[in-house]
Amino acid sequence: MTVDGDVSAMKSFRHTAKRRLAPLAVNLLLGLSAMLPLNGARALGRLLGRIAWWSNSKWRRIAERNIALAYPQLNPEQSQALVRDVLSEAGMLVFEMGHVWRKPWRETQQYILEVEGESLVHDAKAAGRGVIVLGPHVGNWEVLGLHLSTLGDLVALFEPPRIDSLEPLIREARERAGGTLVPTTPRGLARLVRNVREGGISGILPDQVPDDLNGGADALFMGHAAFSATLAPNLIKRSGAVALTGAAYRIPGGFKVCYRPVSNHVYDDDLEVAVTAVNQEVEKVIADWGGQYMWQYKRFRSPTPGAVDHYRDL
């Protein structure tokens, strides 16, 4: 066999091994965390966060860079304390997923201890309007999606994971409260829009950085230019939906789900105005919960030619 053949065979072996082992590993983690009480699972998550801090992990380095950009008013001690909180919350997100994805929905639902603003969803539906909820990466957004499924006919977008063998596991977990996932294709988008026009519900993650230049625009976020998805304002405009923000914040013993109205600028015909307004709404959602935001994600990266690379040295 040639050297190129050896390399190709090794890559094929690694890919096959990853496909087979990934579901086993994820199921093992979910099963073990589901066996623990929620507080116990979260304690393991906090330990994971400490390990990420002590090891100077990539999580830590990205969070430090993001927090320096987003919160320049913090002194070094305050900034480092917030980074530790972010890593701790990220670890808790990992280990509470056994309760969120593995347990029957009736059990998971019991962890939702408070719900605020649910009447906004009901009022929109009573007026014959569909609803699109902008749910950024704060708290546990999987809990938010499951709760939305109980409020009406939910159709949400689903982008297949990089490891395709994980798709059945994720799809089953996210649909078990009654929602329907559709692919991020023209046909999937059309189905989502049709469902919302008919009075249904959808949830959108508004703070993902698109890889495609045609899928986003530069807009201010936390005082900095950030490449931001245009998907949410485009879908709101196409569907005629009522837009709300939503979050499932982590509180002692469970979660607090909150829905809030958005400013009129989110509906603006000027796409730049609408995208900037969406970012401002995300800022409001995380204002008092900065430690629960996914600051270990490269939110300020941009595929725009000539854009500043804030993460080049990490």
Image (cartoon, rainbow, N blue to C red):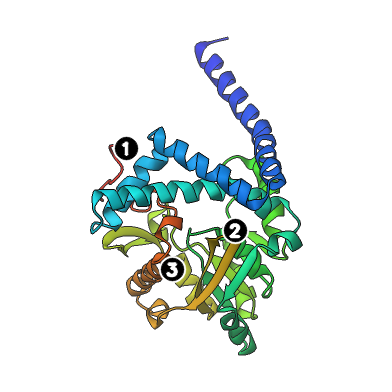
Quick one: SS at disc 1?
Answer: loop
Question: In percent of the image, x 73 and y 53: which residue is there?
Answer: 103
Q: Quadrant of the C terminus?
A: top left
Is the residue under label 3 in contact with that under label 2 (CB below 8 Å)?
Answer: no
Residue that mark 3 sits on: 285
Question: In percent of the image, x 41 and y 42: which residue is there?
Answer: 59
* 243 sits left or right of 37 in the view: left
Q: Quadrant of the N terminus?
A: top right
Q: Say what amino acid the circle numbered 3 marks.
A: Val
Residue that mark 2 sits on: 142
Question: In percent of the image, x 65 and y 60: which residue is there?
Answer: 181
Quick one: SS at disc 3?
Answer: helix
Residue that mark 1 sits on: 314
Q: Say what amino acid the circle numbered 2 marks.
A: Glu
- Looking at the image, can residue 208 be seen? no
Quick one: SS at disc 2?
Answer: helix
Q: CA distance from mark 2 to mark 1?
A: 29 Å
* 187 sits left or right of 107 in the view: left
Question: In percent of the image, x 47 and y 47: which residue is there?
Answer: 88
Circle 2: is it few (<14), some (14-19), or many (20+) Cα within 10 Å?
Answer: some
* 256 sits left or right of 268 in the view: right
| 261 in relation to 81, above or below | below
- Looking at the image, can residue 74 be seen? yes
Q: Earlier in the sequence, mark 3 or mark 1?
A: 3
Point out the residue furthest to the bottom here.
Answer: 127
